[in-house]
Image: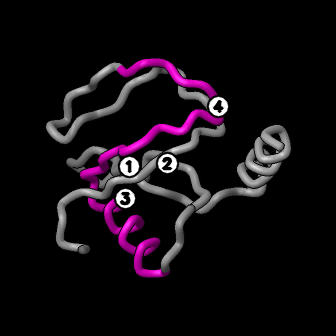
Amino acid sequence: DGKSPFTRCDIIPLTLPEKFGFTNKYGEYEECDPFEVGDRLDDNLFFNKPLVREGKRALDRKLPWVLGRITKGPRKEGQDAPVILVAASDEDKAIFAAWRESTK
């Protein structure tokens, strides 16, 4: 509804992180079970405002899927760097195309 302080989404990773974990809504790091490229990670909750905005934009545009990279954004003085969604690069699109081809 755009008023909730979080967005819920499924993620299909196309690359693997160095560490398997996340920062919860209290800013604490939590480890999670390892996953593989292409595994569907269901019902992820994001409380970070930039990701919530991106989720709302996707819903407003009726987009069922968004291809992008979740990364740290520019850090403002005195603040932690926000976690943001950036548009997929040509390299990201190539990784996605190769993954899609491998699932056929």
- The numbered mark, 1 or 2, whose residue comes first in the sequence reads 2
- The numbered mark, 4 or 1, whose residue comes first in the sequence reads 4
Task: Give how far apart the Cα atoms at labels 3 and 2 are.
Answer: 9 Å
Task: Give the amino acid type for the residue marked by disc 4 in the picture.
Answer: Val
Q: Which residue is mark 4?
A: 37
Q: Which residue is mark 3?
A: 51
Q: Residue furthest bottom?
A: 61
Number of residues whose C-alpha sits closer than 10 Å to that of mark 1, classed few (under 14), some (14–19) or many (20 or more): some
**Colour convention of the picture:** one colour
Q: Which residue is mark 2?
A: 70
Residue 78's x, y, as percent? 20, 48
Residue 13's x, y, as percent? 58, 39
Q: Are marks 3 and 2 in contact (CB under 8 Å)?
A: yes
Task: Give how far apart the Cα atoms at labels 1 and 2 are.
Answer: 7 Å
Q: Residue furthest left?
A: 26
Task: Give the amino acid type for the residue marked by disc 3 in the picture.
Answer: Leu
Dot 2: element: strand
Q: Which residue is mark 1?
A: 83
Task: Give how far apart the Cα atoms at labels 3 and 4 are.
Answer: 22 Å
Q: Are marks 1 and 2 in contact (CB under 8 Å)?
A: yes
- The numbered mark, 3 or 4, whose residue comes first in the sequence reads 4
